[in-house]
Amino acid sequence: ERILTELAGRAQAEEEVRGNLSEQRLLVRRLEHELQSSAQSLRALEGERTALEGELASLRERAAQADARRSEIRQELAAVERRRDTAVERAGFLSHEAKRAAAVAEHARHAVAETREHEAMNRAERRQAEEALAQLTARRLALEELERDRVGLAPAAAALLAVRERFNGGVLGPLSDFVSTGREDAELAERLLGDWMHAVLLQDQDTVLAVQAWHAEHQPGPLVLLPLDPGPAGGTSSQPYDTRLSIEGPAEGWVRAALAGSEVLDQEGRVLRRASGAIFLAGAGAPSGPLRRRAELESLTLEVTQADIALAAADAALRFTVERLAEREALLARSAGAS
């Protein structure tokens, strides 16, 4: 029993030893496997170390290159900073110049607009001057035509003047041709002279006889003749005539005779006292008479001259404005380009 018990104990111990041996063998195998894995990892790590050493050498070379590049970049940065500072200063200057150029361009734009308005005004003034000159010229031409045709003169006097060449200069012309006055006093002068305006001045008595023969032959109508020789009966009146009348040469004696004793009683000349004492109240006169027409012609001649001067001045002003507009438009183009 003791032996069996010992044998059983030893068998149990053997089993324990065998179990421990199996465990140790498993541990050895596991350690061998781990050792192989560690060896493989070591070989892999040695390869990686070799690669890393090569890469480290490359990185060191690249780091040296990077240091050199960094030095270059720092130099470039310093140059760029200097350029930046210069550019900032230049930008400030150009900003100031841009504002100044914009102000100049705006001023030039206003100047061009103002000059265009002035040009339009000059063109309007020139059109007005042209229209006024055309109207005055047309009026003057119409009056000159009426004056040539002796419109308003008595028919017999006009007929005599049409054939005055046949009397060898003995027919001097109607009395109204030798009387002149201002435009404002022409109607008064016509009232003062009355029918005497249609009387015709003759040189001498022989011309009177020749005109009488012509009148008897043609019967043109009533006609008043004023021969200078012998002149008005009773001599020339010493009474001064109205200072508003201007008398030319040979007609003065007959005008004094025609106006002798006549007196203007009002400022407008509508109330006249004749030499006989009769007072004439004039009504509305004819639209125009020879004296008024001649006075208006003289006035129109002066007005046409003034209108010509005004038109020339308007042309000169327009040309100056057009030239100034071209200059200002060119200045505006340059200013706009600069802006």
Image: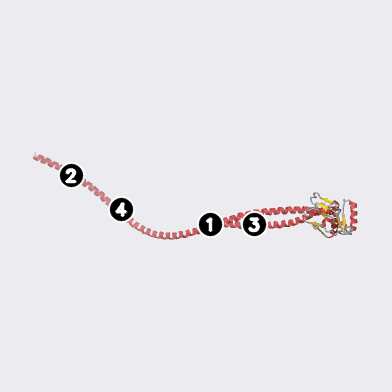
Q: Earlier in the sequence, mark 4 or mark 2?
A: 2
Count every numbered label the image shows and give the total.
4
Residue at 21%, 46% (x, y): give it. 27
Residue type beneath disc 2: Asn
Q: CA distance from mark 4 to mark 2?
A: 40 Å
Labelled pair 4, 2 in contact (Cβ < 8 Å): no
Task: Say which residue label 2 marks.
Answer: 20
Give the quadrant of the N terminus. top left
Rate crowding at label 3 as few (under 14), some (14 to 19) or many (20 or more) other CA atoms within 10 Å: many
Answer few, some or many: residues within 10 Å of disc 2's Cα (few below 14, many 20 plus, some between 14 and 19): few
Mark closest to the chain's N terminus, 2 or 1: 2
- Residue shown at the point (30%, 53%) measured from the top left: 48
Q: Which one is nearer the viewer's eye here, 282 or 302? A: 282
Residue to which mark 1 is pinned: 99
Whichever of labels 1 and 4 marks the residue nearer the N terminus, that label is 4
Q: CA distance from mark 1 to mark 3?
A: 29 Å
Instruction: Looking at the picture, tell me which residue is in the foreground, 95 or 326.
Output: 95
Q: Whole-percent x and y of residue 7?
A: 11, 41
Cα separation, mark 2 vs mark 1, equals: 101 Å
Question: In the image, 269: left or right of 101?
Answer: right
Identify the mark nearer the N-term, 2 or 3: 2
